[in-house]
Amino acid sequence: MRKPIKAVLVGTAAAALLAPCTINAFAHDEPGRGHTDTRATTLGALGLRSGVRIGTAVDMAALADDAPYRAKAAGEFSSVTPENVMKWEVVEPSRGQYDWKAADELVDFARANGQLVRGHTLLWHNQLPSWLTTGDFTTDQLRAVLRKHITDEARHFKGRIWQWDVVNEAFNDDGTLRDSIWLRKLGPGYIADAFRWAHEADPKAKLYINDYNIEGVNAKSTALYDLVGELRKQHVPIHGVGIQGHLSVQYNAPHDIAENMKRFDDLGLETAITEADVRIPMPSDSTKQEAQAEGYDVLLRGCLLTRKCTDFTVWGFTDKYSWVPGTFEGEGAANLFDENYKAKPAYSALRDDLLLAAGRH
């Protein structure tokens, strides 16, 4: 994650989502439910009992060098997402020359710990290799380059990836398609093509379109809703919508998140919270941490209230390794654990939600 994200709203307006829920509200069809020790109380284990995978994005340098980080990543979560090591600039730094080492290490780590892997991401406008961004490609050449990349990466990990973020951040906040190299050169059809190529390369992987600032009902989420509805009519193999969930305590909560997610549910699509974190204007204090807990709580409740929401992933779990301070000046402390791996109120809020959901299954 290396991009500025417009703040999404977090605050007291979420109260409606925090009301008691009916038993059926927590019904899910997630594979693996019940395949865990019911005495376990980690987020991952509680999530499996509730039918929702609880995952984290993983910093591979921290995974290699920090034993407490590695232990927490292995023990607390039931799925993992690579922060950067499956992005184009990392896996194909020179044209036609692939480097899968770090990504393979994450997949092996997940397998060793009984975790599923969300692939992130096959197509994005950021973190592209310089040979691609500076190359003078014709439309046909660029389309061939894109098809080869998606095919090669999806085939390399075939059978080892649960969900792929196939297309990442294709929209502007006003609902128009982002002015990227892909739109300029290939036109809007590049989105459908990317899903078709990914499905051809790995027919069993679940394929997602992923974006930020689509937590509530707004111009951007509605444009994405319209697009995926049209793609479904065209029988494009798109299976889910990833809602990133980058929030800030300075703003009100996306209190209509359950309403928004239900729209995609009604289309027959899966949904997932894919990159959850809640930023705090520094310095942090107990009041801000309680507001942060509410933000996380609203996101998870939205997922638990949506029948086809399959997973909830945090974008990193400790403030020791966070993209936020380097992107948002004066903000930080966005994760569930502090720099010393001490759990914050946000962790307790998620755990309480999952305990309630698990108890109703």
Image (cartoon, rainbow, N blue to C red):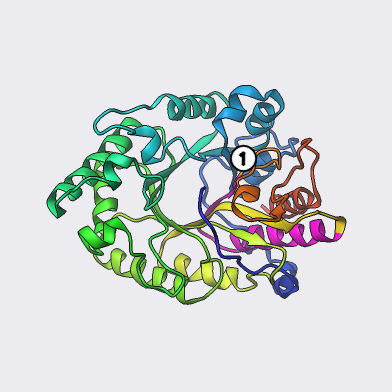
Give the residues in magenta: 287-315
Q: Name which quarter of the figure residue 258 lies in.
A: bottom right
Residue 35: x %, y % from top left: 60, 35
Circle 1 Cα neighbour tier, 10 Å, few/some/many (<14 / 14–19 / ≥20): some
Q: In the image, 164: left or right of 183?
A: right
Decide whether the magenta segment is chiefly helix, strand or loop.
helix
Residue 114 visible from this viewpoint? no
Q: How many marks?
A: 1
Tell which of 211 and 200 is nearer to you: 211
- The answer to whether residue 179 is left or right of residue 190 is right
Residue 290 on the magenta span:
yes
Q: Residue 193 location, x and y as percent?
A: 23, 54
Residue at 63% across / 61% down in the picture? 247
Q: Name the residue type under label 1.
A: Gly
Secondary structure under the numbered disc 1 in the rendered image: loop
Above or below — where is 41 with respect to 52?
Answer: above
Percent of width and height locating residue 92: 32, 34
- Residue 236, picture quadrant: bottom left
Q: Which residue is mark 1?
A: 34
Pick the front one: 196 or 287: 287
Q: Nearer the viewer, residue 101 or 79?
A: 101
